[in-house]
Image (cartoon, rainbow, N blue to C red):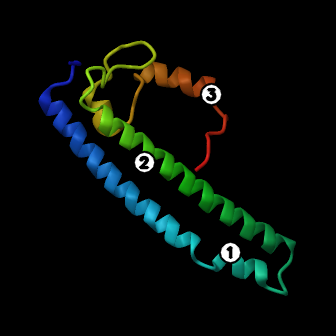
Amino acid sequence: MSHLTKKNLSEIRTALGAKREALLKQIQAALEETGQTQYAEVLGRGSGDSSDEALAITLGDLSAARLDHEVRQMRELDVAMRRLEDKDFGLCVDCGAAIPAARLVANPAAVRCIACQEVHEKTYAGQEHGSI
């Protein structure tokens, strides 16, 4: 087993559940938002100009990007939940170092230690993720 105690795992499991529940509510709100007609109304106005159309398209794109980000986070939490009992849970996927329990409680989906995560973010900054 990893460096994590049963108490650590319990705290991480609780944090995972809470984050997952909050994220689920955010996704539900985003889905409800996409069902609203506010963007279509701006696009459908006869007196609207091209800046109104651009704003409506941008707002729609932002809503879709937000939903995509939240779904990606949900998938990461689900993977973390499945990995919770694995012997390598809590070990950095890049260097194998122990990820502190406090980091895993704050971010249960973390798969890298802070040092490796910083390198990863600098290396892959600006690259797009896959979409839903």
Task: Report the Cα–Cα distance between label 2 and label 1.
Answer: 26 Å
Contact (CB < 8 A) between labels 2 and 1? no
Q: Earlier in the sequence, mark 3 or mark 1?
A: 1
Residue 12: mark: none
> Around disc 2, counting alpha carbons within 10 Å, would you say few (fewer than 14), some (14 to 19), or many (20 or more)?
some
Q: Quadrant of residue 79?
A: top left
Q: Earlier in the sequence, mark 2 or mark 3?
A: 2
Residue 64 place in picture, x, y as percent = 61, 59
Residue 38 place in picture, x, y as percent = 64, 78
Q: Closer to us: mark 2 or mark 3?
A: 2
Q: Quadrant of the N terminus?
A: top left
Residue beneath label 1, please?
A: 39
Q: Secondary structure at mark 2?
A: helix
Relative to 11, say whether 89 is above or below: above
Relative to 48, say whether 60 is above or below: above
Q: Secondary structure at mark 3?
A: loop
Residue under the point 40% across and 22% down = 113
Identified by mark 3, the residue type is Tyr
Q: Quadrant of residue 130?
A: top right
Residue 58 place in picture, x, y as percent = 72, 62
Residue 124: mark: 3
Residue under the point 22% across and 45% down = 14
> Around disc 1, counting alpha carbons within 10 Å, would you say few (fewer than 14), some (14 to 19), or many (20 or more)?
some
Identified by mark 1, the residue type is Tyr
Is residue 108 visible from the viewing direction of this image? no
Residue under the point 26% across and 21% down = 87
Residue under the point 46% across and 60% down = 27
Residue beneath label 2, please?
A: 74
Task: Report the Cα–Cα distance between label 3 and label 1.
Answer: 33 Å
Contact (CB < 8 A) between labels 2 and 3? no
Q: Closer to us: mark 2 or mark 1?
A: 2
